[in-house]
Image (cartoon, rainbow, N blue to C red):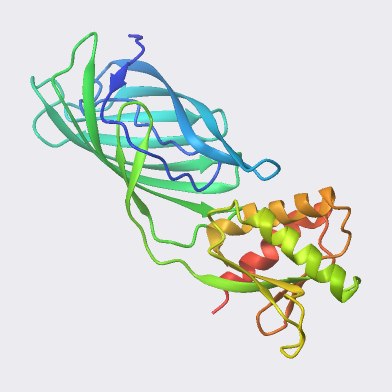
Amino acid sequence: MKFRVVALAGVAGSIVCVVGCIPLTVGSTAKPVPMGTTVHSTSVYVVPNSFDDTLDSRSFPRYGVDNEVRFGFDDHSDIGVRIPSFSGIVANYKRRLNGVTEAPGAATSIMVGGGIVNWGEHAHLEATLITSAAESDRFTPYGGLRAMQVIPIDRGAVHDLPPPRCLCLDGRGRAQRLMGGLMNQATFHLSFPTETPARRSQLSMSLGDSLQSLDQVSSIELVRENPDSQDAGTILSIVLSAPAVALAVRAIAAWATRNNQARIDITTADGTVVVSGLDSADVPKAIRALDGVLRSP
């Protein structure tokens, strides 16, 4: 059995990360592993601005380590099995398009695969077009395009409504989203039914200020319960898309904990109650409820 650690590099990009740990890196060049050979590789990468800290409005990177083993399948292709950040398993098939595996020079391949990621919460599908220079024992640059889609298989998992994203890859595990689809959006009203009107207005402004740091919340405004009243507004209106639901609900619950606020109701714009009395224990249920509104016709 042959063992090596593959070190690859390419053009840097930026990352749009939907959920948890998915196989962002490719981990191998376009050249398949020769038949009868086994190659192990390890990819170490950093995803900038992956996690948001709603307490102090900062973002933090996520670090990942993907381990992969590839087996030569025939004179044009190989098969790989990858463990993305120890949180799932993905298998793929890679086939060289411009000659046999051992042909010298630059290579171009297509790779398709799928598996389970994010600790069993999502199924993962991927398709990758890779091109690489002639292989070297020291350094082999490569690049390509990868389309990925995650599909929830756990009831509490975050949904990804847009069609598959197209990503431009490099050898350091980074990606640039090139295109995506339109996302469903919905307006939600946050209110404090047990408080006085003056206190409701104060709490709505405070919560709105807290949510301002979340780029995923596309609109935040105060709404008056009575259009003829003179207050600034006692209801907080926010517009969310599906990828923003989990982050927004967790941020709202964290704000409520910091402010000792026990009762927050969330309704749709037409007054339909989605969540009554949100607290930290209700976060998974609230995420599913808001996600259900966004997914309903």
Residue 247 higher or lower than 146, as above or below:
below
Residue 263 higher or lower than 146, as above or below:
below
Q: Position of residue 57 (x, y in %)?
A: 63, 43
Residue 96 higher or lower than 209, as above or below:
above
Looking at the rendered image, the quarter that the N terminus falls into is top left
Residue 7 quadrant:
top left
Q: Residue sitting at 35 percent across and 23 percent down? A: 70
Point out the residue furthest to the front here: 230
Who is closer to the viewer here, 201 or 19?
A: 201
Q: Residue sitting at 33 percent across and 23 percent down? A: 71
Who is closer to the viewer here, 297 or 182?
A: 182
Q: Position of residue 231 (x, y in %)?
A: 77, 78
In the image, taking residue 124 as reference, residue 14 lies left or right, namely left
Q: Residue sitting at 13 percent across and 19 percent down? A: 134
Residue 230 quadrant:
bottom right
Question: Disc count in the image?
Answer: 0
Residue 265 higher or lower than 138, as above or below:
below
In the image, taking residue 11 as reference, residue 196 lies left or right, namely right
Question: Is residue 280 among what the camera can see?
Answer: yes
In the image, taking residue 116 as reference, residue 199 lies left or right, namely right
Q: Position of residue 129 (x, y in %)?
A: 23, 40
Question: Is residue 21 among what the camera can see?
Answer: no
In the image, taking residue 222 as reference, residue 127 lies left or right, namely left
Who is closer to the viewer here, 248 or 65?
A: 248
